Amino acid sequence: MKRILLIVSVIILVALAGFFGFRKYTKSFSPESVAESSANGINVKVIYSRPNKKGRLIFGREQDNALLPYGKVWRTGANEATLVELEKDVYLGGKLVKAGTYSLYSVPGQSSWKIILNSETGQWGTEYNDGKDILSVEVSIRIRPSVQELFLIYFEEIPNGANMVLSWDQTEALVPFTNQ
């Protein structure tokens, strides 16, 4: 009986070591980052991982072998699903969002993006369950004059709030958080 318990304990320890080793290994390619804003009373914190362009076509048509084809759901980062923490109720694209923590997904498009907040958190980013979506809005994009090699999320102050900017390659999606 002691031998079986010892074997089971060793198997559990090896599995845990493998899990944490794999997690550390994947994060070395796409480092974890945090973006925050408290502009105009909008308190938003975003926890995400930053994939690298590495010479790939990032956004485009599926037949062109784009990493993120137009019209397909993306985890908006790498590794675990990107988290958006809202300290208080805000408006995202004119729609009310209650305070809380949500997973962020997006659907890149050629002239606009769909931004999705999902109530399921803690999952690997590719495990998307559309039945848990709490909000979906279309947002505008702009073209960068230079290439952004590492995916980056940052904030720009706007009247009554802040734009969360999703920047990668030569595309930036502008996600407006406002207090009215």
Image (spheres, grey):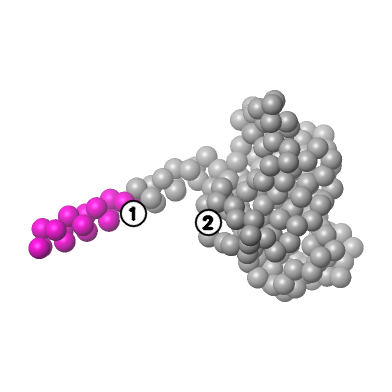
- The local crowd at label 1, few if under 14, some if 14 to 19, many if 20 or more residues have their Cα within 10 Å, is few
Q: Residue 108, relative to residue 56: is it above or below?
A: below
Q: Residue at x 72, y 46 (%)?
A: 107
Magenta segment main secondary structure: helix
Residue occupied by mark 1 = 16
The numbered dot on residue 123 is: 2
Residue 134: give x, y in percent of width and height: 70, 64
Q: Residue 145, relative to residue 107: is it above or below?
A: above
Frontmost residue, 89 versus 133? 133
Q: Residue furthest front?
A: 131
| Circle 2: element type | loop
Q: Residue at x 78, y 41 (%)?
A: 109
Q: Residue furthest right?
A: 159
Say how many tags the image has. 2
Q: Quadrant of the C terminus?
A: bottom right
Residue 62: give x, y in percent of width and height: 69, 31
Q: Is residue 169 left or right of residue 157?
A: left
Q: Is residue 7 magenta?
A: yes
Q: In which quarter of the image is the N terminus?
A: bottom left
Please say whether residue 127 is visible from this viewpoint.
yes
- The local crowd at label 2, few if under 14, some if 14 to 19, many if 20 or more residues have their Cα within 10 Å, is few
Label 2 is placed on what type of residue? Gln
Alpha carbon separation for disc pair 2 and 1: 17 Å
| Circle 1: element type | helix
**Quarter where residue 129 is shown:** bottom right
Q: In this view, does 17 lie to the left or right of 174?
A: left
The span shown in magenta is: 1-17
The numbered dot on residue 156 is: none
Closer to viewer: mark 2 or mark 1: 2
